Amino acid sequence: MSSAISETLEKVRSGGRVNQEEALVLLNARGTDLHEVCAAADAIREMRVGDDVTYVINRNINFTNICIGSCGFCAFRAREGDPEAYFLSVDEIVKRAVQASRTGATEVGIFSGLHPSVDGHTYVEIVRAVKKAVPAIHIHAFSPSEVAYGAEKLGISHVEMLKMLKDAGLDSMPGTAAEILVDRVRKTLCPQKIDTTTWTDIIVSAHRLGIPTTCTMMYGHIESYEDIVAHLELLRTIQGTTGGFTEFVPLTFIHYNTPIYRAGLARPGATGREDLLIFAVGRLYLDNIPNIQVSWVKLGTKFAQVALTCGANDLGGTLMEENITRSAGGTAGQSLEPSEFIRMITDLGRVPRVRDTLYHIRAAHQGEVHNASF
Ligand code: SF4
């Protein structure tokens, strides 16, 4: 093993904190060093959260793909009038949330494109209507980008927008729209999207208002390893201030149908070595974020299972419908049965647990939920 890697892993095992320079060395691990880094991350995972592998019964509702944005990594957006463009009514969103609840879902994830006729009132109306129809369901909705858009359309501050959403019944937010939180990268990747400071301000404000969020990182496109480390450092700093992140979700870039890849500006996604190291280094670096989630939609179920041996402890949700990764060329499907989660987890000798959005184990409903079928 390289001496720099073994020294860093030894430091972590004795309770030390990985610094940015050391994280860079770990991201460059190759050969047997790769396995050593993954094994160290797996050991830290076991020490911090045990052998449970969690997942949530949920449904995604992407209520429109019509978007004024121009993110180069996105194959989901459509323009008004495009044959594939759609815009669900509030009644249809509520209908899907009710259906989800009836089949055992405890969470609906609601996020979409930035539709030109939508504003902050629309977001509030959606949250209020879903909460009224299904009071028990956890509403996990609206990325920092949507919060900024909704607020801008109403001419109000981000904090006011967040307060309105919380009062309407918003329970938590996805920390998406993060991509890579380095403005130089964002200028090429998603030039019209909120910048790093705005993303950070909205997330910190949400946490201070009692709205927990996830945090994400989309990698494997135009970023460098230094950018990845800068991103992880920002997440760790925010968490050190607010404690509001529930989990870190690495999102590997699905390149096939994306404008930035077709224009020859992005590489064709991360390699398998890089994917595994992102989970491992994420676990080692983010020592104040308890959960590392694997996106089976992005990685496919077989690779997702392997990622569970590199520091991850959560498999996300059953989803029931998924449009964003599928549009980009992902082939893992839109929904995964609980029985398939259980098979992946028990095959590793780990313990499957159904959780709610905030990682409370739903032990009392285990049997009922495990038998759920979509
Ligand atoms: S990522 Fe979101 S904001 Fe960007 S173009 Fe796609 S739908 Fe629009």
Image: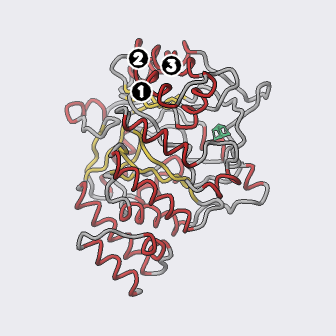
Q: Position of residue 346 (x, y in %)?
A: 30, 52
Check whether the beta carbons of the residues at disc 1 and disc 2 lie within 8 A of each other.
Answer: yes
Q: Where is residue 230 in the image (x, y as percent from the top left)?
A: 51, 62
Q: Residue 131's mark?
A: 2
Which amino acid type is shown beneath numbered disc 2? Answer: Lys
**Residue that badge 1 annotates:** 139
| Residue ID at (39%, 47%) | 315
Q: Earlier in the sequence, mark 1 or mark 3?
A: 3
| Image quadrant in which you'd find residue 113 | top right
Question: Which mark is in front, 3 or 2?
Answer: 3
Q: Earlier in the sequence, mark 3 or mark 2?
A: 3
Check whether the beta carbons of the residues at disc 3 and disc 2 lie within 8 A of each other.
Answer: no
Q: Earlier in the sequence, mark 1 or mark 2?
A: 2
How far separated are the C-alphas under marks 3 and 2? Answer: 11 Å
Question: What secondary structure is found at the residue carrying circle 2?
Answer: helix
Q: Does the residue labelled 3 lie within 8 Å of ligand 1?
A: no
Q: Residue 124's mark?
A: 3
How far separated are the C-alphas under marks 1 and 3? Answer: 12 Å
| Residue ID at (77%, 60%) | 264
Coloration mode: secondary structure
Question: What secondary structure is found at the residue carrying circle 3?
Answer: helix
Question: Which mark is in front, 1 or 3?
Answer: 3
| Label 3 crowd bin: few (<14), some (14–19), many (20+), radius 10 Å | many
State the residue in front, 324 or 164: 164
Residue 168 lies, with reference to residue 236, above or below; the image says above
State the residue in front, 358 or 212: 212
Which amino acid type is shown beneath numbered disc 3? Answer: Val
| Image quadrant in which you'd find residue 203 | top left
Check the picture and name the quadrant holding the C terminus.
top left
